[in-house]
Amino acid sequence: MQQSLPLSLTAFAACVMVIAMAGVKITGIVDQLADRTRAGEALAGAVLLGATTSLSGSVLSVTAAWRGNADLALSNALGGIAVQTAFLAIADLVYRRANLEHAAASAANLMQGALLVTLLSIILLGAYAPPVTVFGIHPATFVLLAVYGYGLRLIQQVRDTPLWHPSLTRETREDVPEQAAGPMTTAALWGWFVGLALLLGVSGWALEHAASSLARQTGLQQTTVGLLLTATSTSLPELVTSVAAVRRGALTLAVGGIIGGNAFDTLFTAASDIAYRQGSIYQAMDATLLLWVALSLVMTGALLMGLVRREERGPAGIGFESVAVLMLYATGLALVLGGG
């Protein structure tokens, strides 16, 4: 049954509000779990915060792929990476003491950025590779999953026994576990975490229905809806959690949550390929999606250079790399909208 346009807009707005509120709450939960488990903010940001805040988008992409809507599945998965990188520049604006790239520099975050670049490159290779499948799944999907798992192992090794350290300055915020990690028990924290994760997942499922309905009723292309509407909406938890983490002083968690969430988002493509039964979903990538993957690579490269360069304070209150990231994202939007 097709929904009316006002009903679709109302459902879409309600899902966005639920995602944003759940994102605020889960930030504090993950920050405390990072201290309790001694996993560190970078890895907790990548696995717990990044994966959970990406859950709504993951459900949306897999649902769309299962319905045969490859355009929406891929554009939502890949569009979120670029917008979430731009959100990190916004978090940089919120942190007024120094540039976020300077204060949150760590070997673990650099490794996460390198992992993200590798995963995005595998997706591009899958798009240009022959359409060979194994049980309907492209080999690039297996490579993505294996590289992601190996990358998480490397991130933990780099954190535990780093051979590279950023120079400590008065504005550097090291990832040191707090002695008092909150009044709740560890079991209660995990309970909250699972509950909020489920809420985000259900919201993503509902958002897919609303977004598809909006696309039909407004005449917008599914790729445009995915890149500009659903990707931004399902990425709201990353914006909320990164800003909340910065205000808590958990800078490594803020950066790790965005970069780690982006790395997890590449798995949306793998999951969508498994759910897509019409063949290899990589072959369904059009020129707009390929452009967006390339844009995400350039934006991640700019962010990595900022983490290595570590400009302490830019003239506009944010680092040059953050300005570059915002300009690149604005250019991407102009190209997508200009292309119809």
Image (cartoon, grey):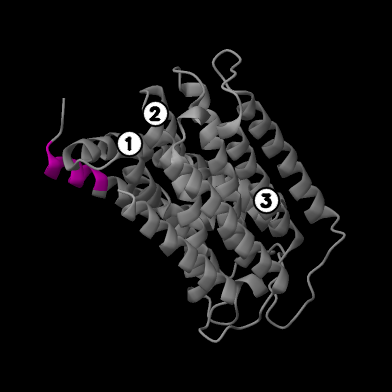
What range of the chain is rendered magenta?
A: 4-12
- Which of labels 3 and 2 is toward the front? 2
Residue 11 inside the magenta-drawn segment:
yes
Residue 170 seen from this side = yes
N-terminal of the pair, mark 3 or mark 2, is 3
Packing grade of label 1 (10 A; few <14, some 14-19, many >=20) is many
Residue of label 2: 63
N-terminal of the pair, mark 3 or mark 1, is 3
Distance CA(mark 3)–CA(mark 1): 29 Å
Q: Secondary structure at mark 2?
A: helix
Q: Is residue 120 left or right of residue 9?
A: right
What kind of residue is marked 1? Glu
Residue 147 position in % (x across, y down): 70, 37
* Up/down of 76 relative to 338, above or below: above
What kind of residue is marked 2? Thr
Q: Which mark is residue 43?
A: 3
Residue of label 1: 208
